[in-house]
Image: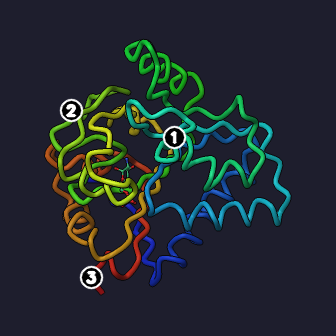
Amino acid sequence: MTKFTEVKASTYAEMSREAAKIIFDDLKAKKDTVLGLATGSTPEGMYDALSTMINEADLDLSEVTTFNLDEYVGLDEGNDQSYHYFMDKNLFSKIDVPKENIHILNGVADDIEKEVKEYEALIDEKGIDIQVLGIGRNGHIAFNEPGTSFDSLTHRVQLTDETIEDNARFFEKKEDVPTEALSMGLATIMKAKKIILLISGANKQEARDLFVSGEVSEDVPVSILHNHPNVILLTDSEARGE
Ligand SMILES: N[C@@H]1[C@@H](O)[C@H](O)[C@@H](COP(=O)(O)O)O[C@@H]1O
């Protein structure tokens, strides 16, 4: 098992700033950094801190490329529950990444098979330098639910009831939550050169403990990260049960 680094922040705000600083330093060091990005409430604070750092430093992002982890099937980019919408609201409307360099899976593509294959091929071509991850209570990363093969590439997934319930808070009612998504696979995520995993809040303590315990199993998707050489885990005190 590889020993990952854990940055133990006290508050959510501190964790968010620490994560933003890691990305900011990478962007400063390499103009054509390829970022892998995540959605969910956890990275919101990080995006806020990162956009402030970028704008204060007037950092040139014209050569930066981004790839998002996942998108719901059936929601187009105008839908305010789509991850396209989330990314625009939380990050892309605040900083200047060229539109053509922003890649997010198309959940309303006519040919889903073609969509996921081309996405994977583009990731292979560009190579992700730093991938941001959040985590689901059941240990899922992106939309790779427990039981997903460690060899999985970008694919169409069925969401578990637990994930649908967790994400229902963003929708008017549970029935509105899509039951399927497109997601980078676990093998896709592992291709990134560096990974930062953000875990915040008491409701994620179990998932954090499961990861830190070090057991590697397809029942716990996040545990694949123990096979990666460069993982930084960022937690707040609530996630550590302190
Ligand atoms: N696909 C996303 C994941 O990428 C995210 O990590 C998870 C946790 O979200 P939150 O940070 O809101 O708890 O939600 C969704 O399932």
Which residue in the protein does label 1 denote?
79
Left or right: where 233 falls relative to 203: right
Q: Position of residue 15 (x, y in %)?
A: 50, 73
Disc 2 + disc 3, Cβ < 8 Å: no
Write the residue at 29% across / 51% down.
Answer: 226
Rendered location of residue 196, percent (x, y): 47, 56
Q: Secondary structure at mark 2?
A: loop
Locate ligand 1 by image quadrant: bottom left
Helix, strand or loop status at disc 3: loop
Which residue is drawn at the image coordinates 52% and 27% (left, top)? Answer: 123
Q: Distance between the Cα atoms at labels 2 and 3?
A: 30 Å
Q: Which residue is mark 3?
A: 241
Say whether mark 2 is within 8 Å of ligand 1. no
Going 70% across and 60% down the picture, which residue do you hit? 51
Q: Which amino acid type is shown beneath numbered disc 3?
A: Gly
The picture quadrant where one finds residue 189 is top left
Query: What residue is at 80 percent from the left and 61 percent from the top?
Result: 55
Q: Is residue 64 above or below residue 45?
A: above
Badge 1 crowding class, 10 Å Cα cut-off, few under 14, some 14 to 19, many 20 or more, is: few
Q: Are marks 2 and 1 in contact (CB under 8 Å)?
A: no
Three-letter code for the amino acid on which mark 2 is drawn: Ser
Q: Mark 2 highlights which residue?
A: 149
Ligand 1 lies under 8 Å from the Cβ of mark 3: no
Q: CA distance from mark 3 to mark 1?
A: 36 Å
Left or right of residue 159: residue 171: right
Q: Secondary structure at mark 1?
A: loop
Dot 3 or dot 1, earlier in sequence: 1
